[in-house]
């Protein structure tokens, strides 16, 4: 689809810098999401270790644990290196307005689904083999991918189809969301934010360490913000941060992609957003070159006849 929609709370920071979180699988709201099943892992290991035979792909748990534990861990965790941005086909969904847009106090963003939605490094997404520059439709099923996993996910010398299959299949309980996903390597992040918890170092020691490593940062309260200043430079600021033991010992890193101005087409304000806040947001966006001058705004209204919402254009 050419245009997709993002439900979200009304966060004023977004109107300063339109960042969307790359949510890693272990942080998603569904414990089944992007999690390869035991049987699928067994089949993939059997193929990778050339153990196919009369057992039709069977390899015992004992053999996996003794000889292939590293491969098992790789198949279980490789998707953790990717972040998901979830969008939908439908801006009218009342459940999603309630659950994801702060009970109609939030917003919906209309976003173009193209290779120019975000900026990417020259080869980053392509070389990962798993990610894509465009959002891909999620498929729904009442069975987890297991023995009946498509053959191309198993019988391939690469693992990309295996991982993509698990990232793009969800329970049919979620079918109402009509989801499309960007699946993007966290190495392609534009910004990383570290939320400081009770780490082993004092703030002064931590900042001294960052300066010694020549890691640029912005400190806002208990947050440290790291910009990826050059996606095409392999030793950029973010690359220094991602696998740094000291940084990761101080708290949890979250990764974000920045929407390009032309990608943001419209903003829909929930029916509980006040006119005062709407006006404030519009003025903020109009004065920010991270947003297109062609951006359109809509006020959401309760439909008087159906359980639905209508959109009224705001001319400003």
Image: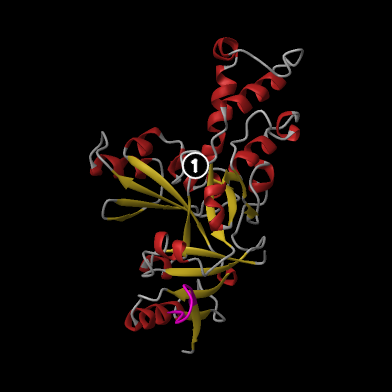
Does 262 appear in magenta? no
Q: Residue at x 75, y 28 (%)?
A: 155
| Left or right relative to 227: residue 66 | right
Q: In this view, which residue lies farthest toward the bottom?
A: 315
> Which quarter of the figure is the N terminus placed in?
bottom right
- Tell me the residue that label 1 is attached to: 25
Tell me which segment is drawn in magenta.
299-309
Q: In this view, which residue lies farthest toward the front?
A: 305
Residue 42, image x and y in percent? 63, 22
Residue 245, image x and y in percent? 39, 33
Q: Nearer the viewer, residue 132 or 57?
A: 57
Does 303 appear in magenta? yes
Q: Nearer the viewer, residue 169 or 209?
A: 169
Q: Nearer the viewer, residue 214 or 255?
A: 255
Residue 45, image x and y in percent? 65, 21
56 w.r.t. 159: above or below:
above
Indicate the quadrant where residue 97 lies: bottom left
């Amino acid at each position: 689809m050419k245009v997709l929609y993002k439900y979200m709370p009304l966060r004023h920071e977004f109107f300063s810098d339109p960042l969307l979180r790359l949510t890693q699988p272990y942080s998603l709201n569904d414990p089944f999401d992007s999690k390869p099943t035991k049987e699928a892992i067994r089949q993939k290991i059997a193929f990778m270790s050339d153990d196919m035979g009369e057992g039709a792909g069977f390899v015992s748990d004992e053999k996996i644990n003794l000889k292939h534990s590293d491969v098992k861990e790789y198949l279980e965790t490789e998707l953790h290196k990717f972040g998901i941005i979830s969008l939908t086909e439908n801006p009218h969904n009342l459940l999603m307005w309630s659950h994801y847009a702060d009970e109609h106090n939030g917003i919906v963003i209309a976003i173009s689904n193209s290779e120019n939605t975000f900026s990417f490094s020259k080869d980053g997404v392509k070389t990962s083999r798993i990610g894509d520059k465009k959002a891909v439709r999620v498929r729904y099923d009442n069975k987890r991918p297991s023995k009946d996993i498509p053959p191309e996910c198993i019988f391939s010398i690469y693992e990309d189809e295996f991982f993509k299959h698990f990232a793009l299949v969800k329970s049919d309980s979620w079918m109402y969301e009509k989801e499309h996903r960007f699946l993007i390597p966290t190495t392609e992040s534009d910004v990383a934010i570290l939320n400081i918890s009770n780490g082993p170092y004092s703030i002064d020691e931590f900042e001294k360490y960052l300066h010694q490593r020549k890691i640029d940062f912005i400190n806002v309260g208990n947050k440290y913000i790291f910009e990826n200043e050059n996606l095409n430079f392999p030793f950029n600021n973010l690359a220094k941060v991602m696998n740094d033991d000291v940084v990761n010992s101080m708290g949890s890193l979250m990764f974000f992609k920045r929407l390009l101005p032309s990608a943001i087409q419209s903003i829909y304000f929930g029916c509980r957003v006040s006119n005062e806040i709407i006006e404030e947001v519009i003025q903020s966006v109009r004065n920010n070159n991270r947003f297109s001058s062609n951006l359109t705004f809509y006020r959401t209204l309760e439909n008087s006849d159906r359980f639905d919402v209508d959109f009224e254009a705001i001319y400003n």
